[in-house]
Image: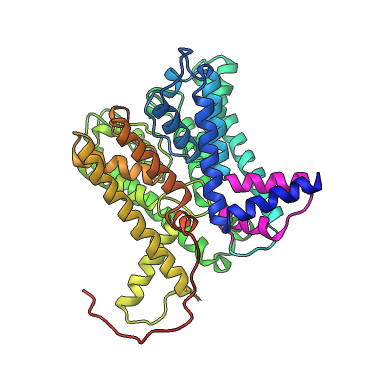
Amino acid sequence: MRGWRRRLRLGVLARFQQPAQVVVGGFAAAVAVGTGLLSLPAATESGQRAAVVDAVFTATSAVCVTGLVTVDTSGHWSRFGEIVILALIQAGGLGIMTLATLFTVLLAGRLGLRGRLLAQVETKTLGLGDIRRLVRNIVLFSLLSEAVAAVVLTARFAVGYDEPFGSAVYHGVFHAVSAFNNAGFSLNTDSMMRYVADPWVTLTVAAAIIIGGLGFPVVFELARNWRRPGMWSVMTRITVFLTVTLLTAGTAVFTLAEYSNPATLGRLDAPAKLLAGFFHSVNTRTAGFNSIDVSALRPESLFTTDVLMFIGGGSAGTAGGIKVTTFGLLAFVIWSEMRGEPKVNVGRRRVPVSNQRQALTVALLGIGAVTVSTFILLSLTAHSFDRVLFEAVSAFGTVGLSTGITADLPPAAALLLVGLMFLGRTGPLTLASALALRERTRRFELPEERTIVG
């Protein structure tokens, strides 16, 4: 047994020389397994095999916790198919490497250096430390958060909407897991539109989305030092400040822009309008549920949604996008450059140059991916620019909000969105390093020469 494990370990090490490669490979393997399961006749309501494009798209959307769909989740997939989707959401949210690390701990009782490195890449921890305890806390915290949300939703569905208890439990668990993992999959054809004025449902879902999207390191640090903001790390400060700022700004913009729009908020009373505006602002942070008709949003609301989806949520959480830490670091870089300061400081901490370069790389790769994909989608479809751009940003940000054109896309366009969702979940920088054949270290320095900028 020991020899077999050693040969397997050596084979893996020979195949993947970098932890990032294993992370990408793990997500790809999960997508492949999910595609296979969703391709079974038992996975559909009709008992017929699902189209390959639909199976691949749905599996990728679930593993990458996006929520975009080419077919109606409850109408097309059977109970078995829905459970497969739920399992893929859970695996994608926690992270393939987080689960793999947990299983390694449970089976082997100890964790080696390479295992710690793999877990560090997936959980975005800043030091090796006790990865085993961290992974355990991540899993326990995730399950506890999902359980609390599931209990509240189950009670509301059973009491407020007279659903049979078994159905209420199933719907409560499904939507709780989907919300905490920022997936946006719903068993309702209209997503959350039937609950637009119900604070018990929408606020519970919103709370699960926010907690899951903050990022595990931030949540754990807040739990330890929530009364002492002065002790917060740079990442926690940026994440909390920008999360509150973007949620508030998004709520204000959506509520004011759609206040009199009869197709969205116009038919609601004032408290319900504010609730719907807040819920939409939360979901632009990469969750993908909608309590109003996204296709009926005004242009200014669509554009604001694009921006918020691209920024995304916190690092090391279940959210997507370039992350608020990336956006925040770039803002501090710009501010320091405008002030003529040679170093970038956040509070009483100096940000390393490597962090600044990573933030710039992630942002520019994200812009490039969305730009190229939008151009290709425009050539493949007859839809307008604003809707095509919205779909591309939603896929890259692993959001799942849609103006309704995803189901009408040709296979080539759907597969392009598959690639965007995968890129958005694994991360542009992680994917780029995983695809690199080898690392090169320059052993000499070239003469410095300044160029004109701007």
Q: Assign the C terminus to one quadrant of the image.
A: bottom left
Front residue (pair 450, 222) = 450
Seen from this angle, which residue lies furthest bottom?
Answer: 447
* In this view, 371 is above or below 172: below
Residue 248 drawn at (x, y percent): 37, 50
Foreground of the two, 274 or 383: 383
Magenta highlight range: 96-125
Query: Residue 164: image x %, image y %?
Result: 56, 14
Q: Is residue 376 above or below residue 341?
A: above
Residue 294 to residue 357: above or below: above
* Residue located farthest toward the top when viewing the structure as drawn: 46
- Please state which of residues 177 and 160 is positioned toward the viewer in this rendering: 177
Q: Judge left or right: residue 312 versus residue 217.
A: left
Residue 160 seen anywhere in this rendered image of the structure: yes
Q: Is residue 280 left or right of residue 148?
A: left
Look at 52% across and 24% down and name the residue there: 82
| Residue 220 visible here | no
Question: As displayed, is residue 158 above or below residue 228?
Answer: above
At 58% across and 64% down in the image, what residue appears?
Answer: 126
Image coordinates for residue 313, horizontal then vertical, percent: 44, 51
The residue at the point 66 percent across, 58 percent down is 114
Residue at 31 percent of width and 55 percent of height: 367
Q: Nearer the viewer, residue 201 or 394?
A: 394
